[in-house]
Image (cartoon, grey):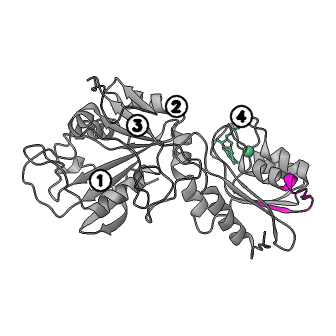
Amino acid sequence: MPEHRVTGPDDALARAVALAQRGPVGGANPRVGCVVTDADGVIVAEGWHRGAGTPHAEAAALAAAAAQETALHGTHAYVTLEPCAHTGRTGPCAEALIDAGVASVTYAVADPNPVAAGGAARLRAAGVDVHGPLDPSGAATALVREWSTAVRRGRPFVTVKTAASLDGRIAAADGTSRWITSSEARTHAHGLRARVGAIVVGTGTALADDPALTVRLPADPSGTHTSSSPTTTARGDEQPEPWRVVVGLRDLPDDARVRGERFVHVRSHDPAAVLAVLHAREVRHVLVEGGPRLVTAFLRAGLVDEVYAYVAPVLLGAGKSAVEDLGVATIADAVRLHPRSVTQLGPDVVLVCDLSQE
Ligand code: AOF
Ligand code: ZN
């Protein structure tokens, strides 16, 4: 392996973020990367987390060093997330770093998980030089954004996707809807699917559209998930397909495309109950793709964190709206979202909004 040298803490953390991105998204655990350097900035060990139940990033780096018979005494560790202090499915990383004799630990983001937090204090108490939180580019924060929100809220992070005409409709008067948005927009939406742990639709959409709810990305016609859309985070090396979730009381035909692996039918209309079922399955990021009934129920329950609104320059004048009655009787009660970005996709745009401003 050629010698890799980092230019400083920011560079080391950027490398750790890149490693973390190899890990799986949407599941119980955050994506975390770890780089260990010697005093000259030469990388002596690296690791990343491959998902719940597997070694943490720090433990993976320590194991890699052990396999090479590399001593880590006096080295410097850079981790995207504060090392954990707890024994969960694996042992405490703070202790492992102390035992390895590292001289310093720099972490990008504090651990929001009360069960695991406290690693920085533990390291300091043992005499390790600790720096952090340190995330100048915001990349490490972005890496765990949805997971952190899920940990704080005790339920999965919820992204709602709508794809509508300029007048907010998702189908023409006769119910036809293929296609309102362009192939560019639809490809982008598959990139969104690739970032979540579950894709949710109502029984109405499942019966009307017979969707497969799989991740299909451009360079990947087989329908598996080894490539990434240029606009989104890569799906990791060991990434399972998202859960395919149908919500509602009606039965699905035995040959529905959505049936198969990682499929679950939640026989409830209550968004909180749906999220509880998925949380128990270790999903931390959910994509609600419709239809209007389900999207409206999530909005009314206050259980939406973010909206991806794909809008096409198409007029239908009649047909189903993307969102139904929200109980807004007067303009003062309008649900105002907080726009984060607007991106043109062929003839269409995607407007990404947060529901709250925190
Ligand atoms: C990870 N990967 O690389 C780090 C984590 O159930 P456990 O034992 O895997 O512990 C999970 C918690 O540990 C996680 O919620 C986070 O707070 C902390 N740090 N977790 O999955 C890692 N460093
Ligand atoms: Zn850990």
Q: Amino acid at mark 1?
A: Arg
Q: Is residue 78 left or right of residue 298?
A: right
Sequence-first tag of 3 and 4: 4
Res 245 seen here: yes
Residue where numbered disc 1 is placed: 336
- Marks 1/4: CA distance? 41 Å
In the image, what residue occupies the spot 27% across and 26% down? Answer: 253
Name the residue type under label 4: Arg
Label of residue 281 in the image: 2
- Identified at 46% across, 33% down, the residue is 262
Residue at the disc numbered 4: 89
- Does residue 257 show up magenta in the picture? no
Mark 4, ligand 1, within 8 Å: the answer is yes
Say which residue label 3 marks.
Answer: 244
Mark 3–mark 2 Cα distance, whole angstroms, equals 12 Å
**Mark 1: is the Cβ under 8 angstroms from ligand 1?**
no
Crowding near the residue tagged with mark 4, few <14, some 14–19, many ≥20 C-alpha atoms within 10 Å: few
Q: Which residues are magenta?
A: 65-78
Q: Is residue 77 magenta?
A: yes
